[in-house]
Image (cartoon, coloured by chain):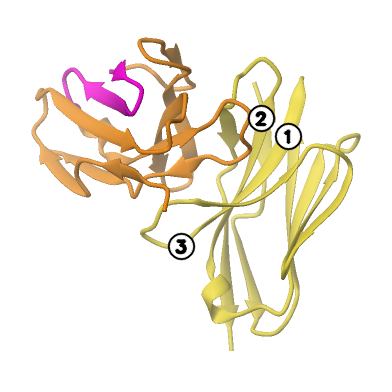
Chain colours: A orange, B yellow
Amino acid sequence: DVKVTQSSRYLVKRTGEKVFLECVQDMDHENMFWYRQDPGLGLRLIYFSYDVKMKEKGDIPEGYSVSREKKERFSLILESASTNQTSMYLCASSSPMGHEQFFGPGTRLTVL
Amino acid sequence: GQNIDQPTEMTATEGAIVQINCTYQTSGFNGLFWYQQHAGEAPTFLSYNVLDGLEEKGRFSSFLSRSKGYSYLLLKELQMKDSASYLCAVRVTGGGNKLTFGTGTQLKVEL
């Protein structure tokens, strides 16, 4: 059974804290993605990665950075969390030619 | 960029057929995708169209017209468990495998 896992289902942080969201996939996929999902705005792409140590900005990268040191792991970093980063964060992976993105269960982050 | 439109909400009756529309404007179109997302869960892949026409998969079918920038997802023999959000997404050439999603259509199936 293919799996994308995320480090936490729920996370509460304070404004200004550095936040790490971890995503791990066991499908040997080259492509990995970070989205945030907000009511009325849908899924929006923050960053994605085609391979280890490679990253590209998505549609809303401001305030975020990413790290991909190993193929199976893609981390999203909030350098200084702000209240407008309160959201559901979803990680996904896919093979380069595949049609399907496999999503993790999501992390609901609240920044107080 | 891409512009994707789909209705916000729809309601249908158990056993009936429902059609969820999606229109898009993009350059370099390279595929249209439908995902299903139940409340509190991750999206799951339903269908993919890159050529014009209908793709059927059990109770679900998806249609694409590239010239019109239009797709629909057809759900037959609706069941209560089909109550979910349905997300339309577009892929463009040169973008790798990244998708741009619409805001989703919340479908409610009633008795």
Viewer-side residue, B39 vs A56 = A56
Considering the numbered disc 2 on the image, is that residue within a helix, a strand or a loop? strand
Residue B91's tag is: 2
- Amino acid identity at mark 1: Gly
For the residues labelled 1 and 2, say whether their Cβ atoms are less than 8 Å apart. yes
> The C terminus of chain A is located in which quarter?
top left
What residue did someone put label 3 on? B38
Residue at the (64%, 20%) spot, across then down: B1
Q: Position of residue A47 (x, y in %)?
A: 41, 21
The part of the chain drawn in magenta is A64-82
- In this rendering, is residue A18 above or below A41? above
| Residue drawn where x is 11% and y is 28% of the image | A15
Residue displayed at 19% across by 44% down: A8
**Residue at mark 3: chain:** B
N-terminal of the pair, mark 3 or mark 2, is 3
Q: Position of residue A32 (x, y in %)?
A: 43, 28
Label 1 residue SS: strand
Quadrant of the rendered structure where residue B25 is? top right
Report which residue position mark 1 lands on: B31
Residue B67 drawn at (x, y percent): 91, 34
